[in-house]
Image (cartoon, grey):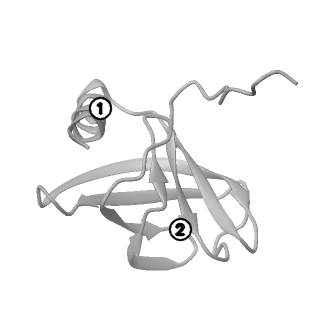
Amino acid sequence: MPLVQDARFHPRQRIHAHADVIGSEVVLARTLDDLSLGGCKFSGPAWEPQGTTVELVINFLESAENLPVQGVVIRASQNDMAIRFEDLSEEQFGALRTHLQAN
């Protein structure tokens, strides 16, 4: 049986960060399960339905820096909620890459 590789364009990483998520509800300081250049995931039951546009402020705890981004919920289940980032500026993308490389 051949080995299966992760086909993601942007590999996910576990990182020590929280995010404030603003959609139909406001959720503060929610721990990120993982993060990539393309999006993020939260463990536990989803609080926003799939397709919802959300604003996030990612708080990188080790550097005490914040990064505001916009995204859309692409998976909402009882187990997790996944968000794909949208319309990242070059500055946002660069800051995200810097934090991921430092991890």
Dot 2, crowdedness within 10 Å: few (<14), some or many (≥20)? some
Q: To which residue does mark 1 refer?
A: 97
Residue at the (12%, 61%) spot, across then down: 64
Give the SS element for disc 1.
Answer: helix
Of discs 1 and 2, which sits in the foreground? 1
Quarter of the view holding residue 29: bottom left
Q: Residue at x 58, y 73 (%)?
A: 24
Residue 30 drawn at (x, y percent): 42, 74
Question: Which residue is the site of mark 2?
Answer: 23
Does residue 62 appear to the left or right of 37 in the view shown? Answer: left
Examine the rendered structure and indicate whether residue 42 appears above or below residue 74.
below
Q: Nearer the viewer, residue 15 or 30?
A: 15
Q: Quadrant of the N terminus?
A: top right
Depth check, front residue: 29 or 70: 29
In the image, farthest residue toward the left: 63
Tell me the kind of residue under disc 2: Gly
